[in-house]
Amino acid sequence: MAEIGKGVTAGKLASNVQKRLSRAQEKVLQKLGKADETRDAAFEEMVANFNKQMTEGTKLQKDLKAYMVAVKTMHEASRRLQDCLADMYEPDWYGKEETDALAEDLDTLWLEYHQNITDQSLLCVDTYLAQFPEIKARIAKRDRKMVDFDSARHHFNSLQKSKKKDEAKIAKPAALLEMAAPSWAQGLISAHQVAQTNLSYNQAEEELGRAQKIFEELNVELQDELPTLWDSRVGVYVNAFQKLANHQEKFHREMGNLTQNLHDIMTKLEEQRELKRDDAAISKKGEGKKSEGANHSESAAVAPKKLGLPPSRPPPRLTPSPDLRQHCADEDEDLVPATTKESTSPTPQGPSWDLWEGQSATEPTPQPVVDQCTEETQSDWNSNDATNQSCPQHSWNDAEAAEAEEAWSHDQDYAAQTYTEPSWDDDDVGQGEWGDEESTVANGSDGELPPGFLYKVKAVHEYTATDGDELELNVGDIVLVLAFDNPDEQDDGWLLGLKESHWLQKKNISAKGVFPENFTQKV
């Protein structure tokens, strides 16, 4: 049995070698032009389209795989970035749990996106390209069978041509042989020659028929399949890219939602940070106010910064004249210090009654009863009990009392609205004419001082501004204190001012700002 198997294998091997030799010989003859070649232009065009289609599909498959590698790389990069955020995110920060859940959702989204593209788009292209190797092998087989068909055809044609020549050549020797041979053998010799010639011819014809049949079967099959395969490429491309686009759209939509959630978490975290910073600034200001209140007694001993409301004025004269009321209102405007929020008592306090005595001395018609009231009030002022004392009321008629009451109310309201904070130094108190000083210092009409100037202070502590409307101070800076445009805007313990150096250089108040009072000392 082994010998039989070896014989069969050897026979097949010899047959294959013989076929390859005959094919090589046929191709050489075709290239040399000694043998014609079967050509099919339509089929050759189909083969060219097939090769182009296979090249494009292979490139698409390669690029899709590269895209999948990039998706996987992006997934790893996104995961590392989220892990970094989770490591840096403090447990007490806002949205810690939401951030961790968001990182898990992002990781799941990347995995699903990679898996969907692999299962649908890439798998579709792989299935499409899987049929190309088999068709390519059949095209190569068809080419080999076409060479076999050409070889068999050429062999058969050569036998046909040689048969006619051999018949003429064999006729003469056969005639001589028949003449020499016995009569009974002459017919056998002729029959043998004819049979030998017919055998070679019949074998060549059978070989040609078999080669032609195999070639035509393959040719017909490929001519049916190749156009169908060429047209199928459009559907494959549409299916692959449509699924890819759908998965991309879904992925980016969900990714946009997750990134928006992350943005919202970061925004709220920033808002909380700003809120805590504002609270810290408010607490710092509160501590500054407490410190200013604790140091107020010391700073007041050197140069008092703020005073209480103006004291109560004495009762009006029995017969106040309009000129007298206007004069008193002017004096109140010059003498009454600025109202501050730091005052702890709603009861107003007035300036020294010496000024009232001076003014009373200049009146053309002083009233004794008012002088007596003034003396009592002055004695009460010196004993720090002015608010608990009252002047004796003399006999007024109702009209005079109502007129005096109205004049006093008008003067008090006017003074509360128009007074500015005066300087309480000894030199300022000693000035004889208060009206002249107010017009020069407070208004700054001479051009050497800014409008609304009150007095000068010197910075004894360094202060760093924490807001845009604050004035930054260095030790030794001279500041020109200005009056607030709206007294209600002034905070307790804060002054409005402008550095003297800026005023001397620029001559404008654009750099004015507020600063803590207890960081300065009056000059």
Image (cartoon, rainbow, N blue to C red):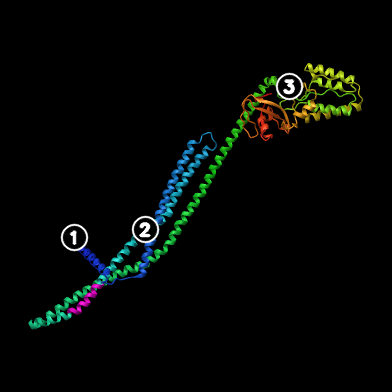
Circle 3 sits on which residue? 425
The image quarter in which residue 484 lies: top right
Residue type (three-letter) at the residue carrying disc 1: Gly
Near-viewer residue (420 or 48): 420
Residue 71, image x, y percentages: 44, 48
User: Is 165 in the magenta?
Assistant: yes
Q: Please name which of the two marks, 2 or 1, marks the residue nearer to the observer.
A: 2
Q: Is residue 245 left or right of residue 227?
A: right
- The residue segment tinted magenta is 153-166
Residue 297, image x, y percentages: 68, 20
Along the polypeptide, which appears first: circle 2 or circle 1?
Answer: 1
Q: Residue at x 50, y 51 (%)?
A: 250
Q: Please name which of the two marks, 3 or 2, marks the residue nearer to the observer.
A: 3
Q: Residue at x 74, y 20 (%)?
A: 426
Label 1 SS:
helix
Q: Residue at x 45, y 43 (%)?
A: 77
Residue type (three-letter) at the residue carrying disc 2: Ala
Residue type (three-letter) at the residue carrying disc 3: Asp
Count how many numbered circles sit on residues in the image.
Answer: 3
Circle 2 sits on which residue? 130
Residue 239, image x, y percentages: 45, 58
Cα separation, mark 1 vs mark 3, equals 135 Å
Along the polypeptide, which appears first: circle 1 or circle 3?
Answer: 1
- Which quarter of the rendered picture does the C terminus lie within? top right
Cα separation, mark 2 vs mark 1, equals 36 Å
Circle 1 sits on which residue? 5
Label 3 SS:
loop
Q: Is residue 124 left or right of residue 291?
A: left
Callout 1: 10 Å neighbours few (<14), some, many (20+)? Answer: few
- Which quarter of the rendered picture does the N terminus lie within? bottom left
